[in-house]
Image (tube, rainbow, N blue to C red):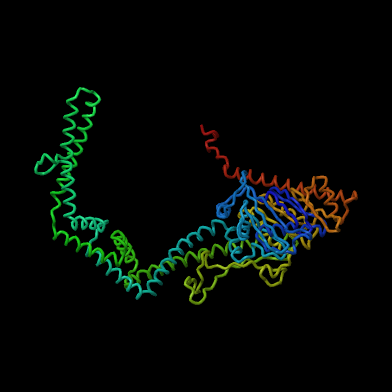
Amino acid sequence: MLAEMRIQGLGVIEDALLELDRGFTVVTGETGAGKTMVVTGLHLLSGGRAEASRVRVGAGKALVEGRFAGLEGEQVAGIITDAGAEPDEDGSVIALRSVGSDGRSRAHLGGRSVPVGVLSELSEQLLAVHGQNDQLRLLRPAEQRAVIDRFAGETVGAPLAEYRRVRTEWIEIATELAERSGRSRELAQQADMLRHGLTEIDSVEPKPGEDAELTEQIKRLAAVDELRAAAGEAQSAVSGAADGDPDVPGALGLIAEARRRLSSVEDAALRDLEPRLAEAAVLLTDVGSELGAYLDGLDADPEKLEQVLARQSDLKKLTRKYAADVDGVLAWAEDARQKLSTMDTSDEALAELARRRDELGTELANHAAALSAARKTAAAELAEEITAEMSGLAMGQAGIDVIVSTRAAEKDDPQTLEIGGEQAHAGPDGVDEVELLLRAHSGAPALPVHKAASGGELSRVMLAIEVVLAHADTVQTLVFDEVDAGVGGRAAVEIGRRLARLARSHQVLVVTHLPQVAAFADRHLVVDKGIDSDHITRSGVRVLAQSERVLELSRMLAGMDDTATGRAHAEELLSAAVADKEAAENGKHHRRAAQRKKKAGAPKKAPESGRGDGK
């Protein structure tokens, strides 16, 4: 919900803080005091169009800041996270919009600068502003269909889920068939190239890392003389001359002489060194043996070298064509095999895809028809309930029709379904187009709501819809601007009563000039107007105490704030509103009790034997 909102330098408002709460909040004030600036501020906070003309005279910029608390839902969390915003410690997040006198606009969310569109996305999940001449949320074509879906709940939700599941597979199969059919020659050529490459690679049968191993072998075979000389000299240095020449004793002979000399002395420190020389002799013996084995296996083999070079040449032919090394060639081969498995362009494969596409199309058409039928049933119920609500909103002769029709497919539309002999566009939400039509009075033609209704009537239609959808609407904060335009008397009382009813499940903020509506509010804000020393209108917003509400309602009652009659009338309005809300609350408790009793079930009948307790 919107916990608080601050407005600075917007219109006549210099600096105002609106402390909001759950339930029904009303905003009143004299004409020209700046009540509509509250709604304008909400529009800006929702990513609406910024106009330099809205900036207060003498101010460098207008600023609107809102704090949203109690945020719920994955979409809301996703928007905040994706924007890099940082919620406060209490989980609330602050949105800010500024408009300079030059018309430039800035947006921030959670302390981060964000595109204005981010505020728009967030507000669609949190706010619904209903005011005259607005592009209202519920008048968008997609939203009108969503109205029925929310109203119907699982009745529409179940067939819609099945429709979407089948449609996903249908599109995948149809896309694959179109791609294979349209690119059959190209795919056939690619398949031939892949098969040729695999044949060439398979004939060589490369092994992982084989090219590196061959390089080492070639180096060894090509330099066998140098390697033999080096290994032989090293062995002589370790073990001594091969012919036993005492003049070339080798390291082992020298160590043996050193051990003999140390073992013959009486000094303990020198004798302690002898075991370490023994360890060195063991290590050198192992090295000498390994050098001897190396020399034994180092015979020159020109034929072997030729074989290894030939193998290396075969591998290089592959690496020149397919990858930088043998491991890359093997990876290319694996990828080629996977591609070939999906490139079957034979007549049999295409026929199987076409059969599966048609089979899914038939199944999808059945789900679409079931979805349309569920929506039409819900549309009739929805229209009846909205019309009933409108009868108490000074629109007793008006009526709503909710029309569900099939969206015709355009020429060459790849997502075309045949339903009942008609070619329909199979969109992600079905084949249905939904439109809300208004009959302004009996005998009047049914026209789209935004064309048939005046500004005030449009807001009342939206109020009626919101009341009907209160159980299913996910947007928690509803704002109504001049929803009572052109009405008075009992109709105004009915509007106040419905807004109070709506406030049981939503946060409701209403800008009004009617005391009958304001009396039903849980919280009353007033916009005060004054003139500063420069003769510029200056307004602020404050919360009214109960005693102050009486004076404000008196003022709204034809300006009778200083008369006993006006105060008495205002007190009567407040008392009647409180009594009405208490009665509605008690009625809700009674209904809940009745429902609990019904769930518990009626008492079991006593046995016919007359024993009553069954014992």
Q: Name the spot of residue 281 as percent of width and height, x first.
A: 19, 35
Residue drawn at x 25%, y 25% as measured from the top left: 269
User: 362 or 607, which is in the foreground?
Assistant: 362
Residue drawn at x 85%, y 49% as measured from the top left: 551
Q: Name the spot of residue 92 as percent of width and height, x first.
A: 63, 47
Residue 277 shown left or right of residue 424 in the figure: left
User: 503 or 13, which is in the foreground?
Assistant: 13
Asked whether residue 584 is in view, the answer is yes
- So how many labels did they put on this image? 0
Q: Name the spot of residue 481 as percent of width and height, x first.
A: 73, 59
Q: Is residue 460 above or below residue 1?
A: below
Q: Is residue 370 above or below residue 519?
A: below
Residue 242 occupies quadrant = top left
Residue 159 shown left or right of residue 177 in the figure: right
Residue 388 shown left or right of residue 151 in the figure: right
Q: Name the spot of residue 249 as percent of width and height, x first.
A: 14, 39
> What is the residue that sits farthest to the left in this orientation?
243
Residue drawn at x 80%, y 45% as measured from the top left: 546
> What is the residue that sits farthest to the bottom in this orientation?
411
